Amino acid sequence: MSPRPELSLSLQFADPRHRALLPRHKVQRFIRAALELPGEIAVRIVDAEEGRALNREYRSKDYATNVLTFDYSHEPVVGADLVICAEVVEQEAAEMGIPLLDHYAHMLVHGTLHAQGYDHEEDDEAECMEARETEILAGLGVADPYRKA
């Protein structure tokens, strides 16, 4: 097994509700599993108000979303901020009937792939990105989030 790329991580909890669920070493493990190059990544867990404001300002969408990725560089070092809305992730996990930590793992992997240029706007891009997410999550012991029940 090849060593995972180096990661400089800043972890911030503006919404502390899931702080105990997301210790630094778990967040690092999820992100590192998706990194293809060394990374400098900040993860900020926010409430719905901050998530909505950021989504409105940067994507012109007036609602809180599960994860926003602000990518600054793809190489030689991946530089990005991942903003994850605790309320949305909690609600989605409950609706899907999956463990909350598994959904956080998915959002961290998803955001990290976006930070490296992956996208899902077009069908072929979505297929590629979803396959990569599924592969990474399987390696982390997380079920395929795209499998239809």
Image (spheres, rainbow, N blue to C red):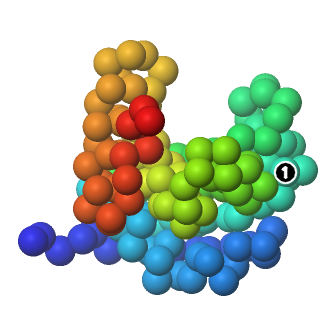
Residue 143 is left or right of residue 88, and the answer is left
Residue 135 is left or right of residue 41, and the answer is left
- Look at the image and tell me in which quarter the C terminus lies: top left
Provide residue 116's location: percent of width, then percent of height.
38, 46
Residue 132 visible here: yes
Give the residue furthest to the right. Answer: 49
Residue at mark 1 = 48
- Which residue is painted at 78% across and 73% down in the image? 17
Provide residue 24's location: percent of width, then percent of height.
53, 82
Residue 129 is left or right of residue 17, and the answer is left
Give the residue furthest to the front. Answer: 149
Determine the secondary structure under disc 1.
helix
Q: In which quarter of the image is residue 14?
A: bottom right
Q: Kindly identify the amino acid type of the residue bearing the numbered disc 1.
A: Ala
- Look at the image and tell me in which quarter the N terminus lies: bottom left
- Which residue is painted at 29% across and 43% down in the image? 132
Q: Quadrant of residue 140?
A: bottom left
- Which residue is painted at 46% across and 66% down in the image? 40
How many numbered badges does the structure rendering display?
A: 1
Provide residue 23's location: percent of width, then percent of height.
57, 82
Residue 37 visible here: no
Provide residue 120's location: percent of width, then percent of height.
44, 27
- Which residue is painted at 29% across and 37% down in the image? 131
Front residue of 124/104: it is 104
Front residue of 6/47: it is 47
Is residue 25 depicted above or below 145 in this figure?
Answer: below
Front residue of 17/35: it is 17
